[in-house]
Image (cartoon, rainbow, N blue to C red):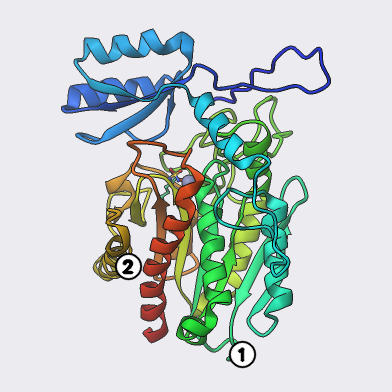
Amino acid sequence: MKELVVWAICLIPICVAYPYHGYRVYEAVAKNVVQAQALSDLEMSESFDFWSPVRLNKPTDIMSSPEQIQQLLDVFNSNSIQYRIKIDDVQQLIDAQNNIMGNEIVRKSSSLRYNLTWDNYYRYDDIREFAYALGASYPELVTVSVAGKSYEDRDLILIKISSGGSGSKNAIFVDGGIHACEWISPATVTYIIRELVENYAAHPQYVDDVDWFFMPLVNPDGYEFAHTDNRLWRKNRRIHDETNTTCIGTDINRNFDYHFDEGGSSDNTCAPTYNGGQPFTEPESRALRDAILAEANRTKSYLTVHSYGQHWLTPWGWTTELPADYDAMYALASDAVAALTAVYGTVYDIGSSANLLYANSGPSDDWAKGVAGIPYTYTIELRDQGPVYGFLLPPDQIIPSGIETWEAFKVIAEAVALME
Ligand code: 0X9
Ligand code: ZN
């Protein structure tokens, strides 16, 4: 994804950016290898934003600027590729969601000491406030600490939920918001934190039998930038002063030191999957690494929450070969997904990243398994499946996403509690 910031010429003090005005998202389906190759060639040309990977007989979402729409249609037509318009005007959808979110947010009632209501997407400050408010209200369950600082100096919040045991219990580590535009991720992760803490009395076993560690927003700088400037921003906001480039940001999920830069990760600072040049160049990935390592010997499951696609992914991304204990990983994933699907019928598929999605190297889950030695590491790609909104998931899906994902997390917690 190129950085698409087309600023209006600014003669008045308040400038408004409409970077995606007239941008369209098409859904195309490659039904044979020739069509798949044509789409892959298009992706390699880096002229279009591919929101989802090219896979045979599966929909691929491709965003086009207004100027390039005809070029895209020509490729579809000359290869007889079946397509449809999925989002007619990306900026209109962003604006519609901003209007819902704008001024009408239900502000905190007197009994709540935080803003989050899970019927809207909230900003970094609100998420941070939520963490400290829980810590203050439930000191016997919640400990908040700072795992490090982001490139722009924001605190990286770490929340421990534990009812005691002096570190003897098995643990689960969860993170969200590695990718800035995937707003449903921190929203769902904070929903689960709230469920564990504020509804503790309804199901104390999920806290009593395991310890939880949450980093709900790994990439706060990117997340804020996605709110203020570019809704579809993915990377962090580091300025690459070691290179002569004007492009900003590294994909935190390509910056981990396990089979680093072995495919599906870019050495180009302008690319959306820029890997940082070296492993652990980013303060956010270092802080996440250190927080995971601090509890790795008792952490049985690492859940890194992304969107979109409704996939429950296992490592690896760098090879299509499967981990030696893949069957056990698959069995637990399928129990978790069954519980999730039972709520509203939301379908997830399960498989290894390279097999189900695409080759990619340096993601946090591969490192958590391959280096930190955590057995059950999964990337969870939340709603939707792509046919409708993709990254622009409407806020009225936050609570349903939270409710169904919580059911899956309960299954993971029950299994982790019983592990050796
Ligand atoms: O590409 C990614 O970083 C993840 N998908 S996303 O659309 N959220 O960007 C998938 C990472 C999968 N994990 C592994 N390859 N192990
Ligand atoms: Zn992601």
Can residue 145 be seen? Answer: no
Query: Which of pointers 1 and 2 lies earlier in the amino acid sequence?
Result: 1
Which of the labelled discs sits on residue 336, or is there none? Answer: 2
Q: Is residue 409 above or below residue 350?
A: below
State the residue in front, 391 or 269.
Answer: 391
Q: Residue at x 39, y 71 (%)?
A: 375
Q: Is residue 345 above or below residue 179?
A: below
Q: Is residue 187 left or right of residue 221?
A: left
Neighbourhood count class around disc 2 (C-alpha, 10 Å): few under 14, some 14–19, many 20 upward: many
Can residue 39 be seen? Answer: yes
Q: Identify the image quadrant of residue 40.
A: top left
Q: Is residue 315 left or right of residue 372?
A: left
Q: Is residue 263 left or right of residue 3?
A: left
Q: Position of residue 233 (x, y in %)?
A: 58, 35
Residue occupied by mark 1: 166
Q: Amino acid at mark 2?
A: Ala
Q: Amino acid at mark 1?
A: Ser
Q: Residue at x 29, y 13 (%)?
A: 75
Neighbourhood count class around disc 1 (C-alpha, 10 Å): few under 14, some 14–19, many 20 upward: few
Q: Residue at x 67, y 48 (%)?
A: 123
Which of the labelled discs sits on residue 365, or is there none? Answer: none
Residue furthest right as drawn: 13
User: Which quadrant, please, contains the C terminus?
Assistant: bottom left
Residue furthest left as drawn: 32
Q: Identify the image quadrant of residue 247.
A: top right
